[in-house]
Amino acid sequence: MFDVIIRRASLRFGNHCVFTDLNLTLKGGQWTCLLGGSGVGKTSLLRLIAGLPAGETTGEVVCQDGFSVHHRIAWMAQQDLLLPWFSVLDNITLGQRLRRNLTDVFTRRPLLSAEVQEQAMSILEKVGLSAKADVLPQHLSGGQRQRVALARTLMENRPLVLMDEPFGALDAITRLNLQDLACELLQNRTVLLITHDPLEALRLGHEVYHLRGHPARLTDAITPPGKTPRSLDDNGLLALQGRLLDRLRHESFDEQTGVP
Ligand SMILES: Nc1ncnc2c1ncn2[C@@H]1O[C@H](COP(=O)(O)OP(=O)(O)OP(=O)(O)O)[C@@H](O)[C@H]1O
Ligand SMILES: [Mg+2]
């Protein structure tokens, strides 16, 4: 598995400099988690890595193996982005169907090869939704919909997975369950996870960074000990959570008052 190296990345919107000269290495096969206040530039950094920049950008994103990062990325957002008129199965195979352009000549509906269908059903089983393959998204709960989004990410089968607050809209228990599931199913992928939840970052991250300030800078990495997903009754983890929460709270307080 290859590292992804972000070198001297800068982003500006007019005279608003979001970040400048930012360097980050996503270690191959590991989870890097990124915390930071609202508006600091987390999604913008993710978009820059994915080659979807808005604003004026400089810098480079390179893979350690020398190949381009393009076509090696899957994206999972906070909104599940499911198409309401497609079944669960059709939603998770959308990428394959669009790329292969397979369409039934009579109904104009996109077709699935037996191999893709089998793969999709096996992934739905892993996320516990094989019974829902033919159901429309409107008949699913928020947690189920986000499991479909995870299944769609897995269907893409990319080595680099960019996740922008994927569990942010879920209740605490569903969120913990989905963290465990994603950790299991995305093992050995290179993952960059953005979250507002320090505990989530500390449970899942091999390295945890905090993006802060204007222009934003990355703090040194925290490397929590132990295997992921880390247990909730680990006192060391809870102490780190307290410190991170405190840091994040002061950061937003400083922004409101203008105190540096
Ligand atoms: N298209 C745009 N035009 C102008 N400014 C933008 C644009 N997109 C983002 N910004 C600005 O860039 C900054 C970073 O935005 P970004 O969406 O990356 O923040 P974020 O850290 O992801 O915040 P949140 O946690 O709320 O999602 C913000 O100040 C935002 O207003
Ligand atoms: Mg964002």
Image: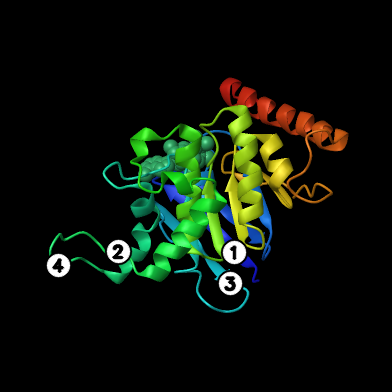
> Which structural element holds mark 4?
loop
Mark 3 to mark 1: distance in Å?
11 Å
Q: Are marks 3 and 1 in contact (CB under 8 Å)?
A: no
Residue 45, horizontal then vertical, whole percent: 52, 51
Residue 228, horizontal then vertical, whole percent: 75, 49
Q: Which residue is mark 2?
A: 98
* CA neighbours of label 2 inside 10 A, class few (<14), some (14 to 19), many (20+): few
Question: In the rendered image, which quarter is residue 247 located in?
Answer: top right
Q: Is residue 54 visible?
A: no
Q: What kind of residue is marked 2? A: Leu
Mark 3 to mark 2: distance in Å?
27 Å
Q: Which residue is mark 1?
A: 7
Mark 1 to mark 4: distance in Å?
48 Å
Of residues 206 and 189, which is closer to you in this image? Answer: 189
Mark 2 to mark 4: distance in Å?
15 Å
Of residues 232 and 57, which is closer to you in this image? Answer: 232
Query: Counting residues from the N terminus, which is met first, the one under dot 2 or under dot 4?
Result: 2
Ligand 1 neighbours mark 2 (CB distance < 8 Å): no
Residue 134, horizontal then vertical, whole percent: 35, 47
Q: Quadrant of ligand 1?
A: top left
Q: What kind of residue is marked 1? A: Arg
Query: Counting residues from the N terminus, which is met first, the one under dot 3 or under dot 1?
Result: 1
**Above or below, 180 relative to 154:** above
Which one is in front in this view, the residue at disc 2 or the one at disc 1?
A: 2
Question: In the rendered image, which quarter is residue 173 located in?
Answer: top right
Q: Which residue is mark 3?
A: 63
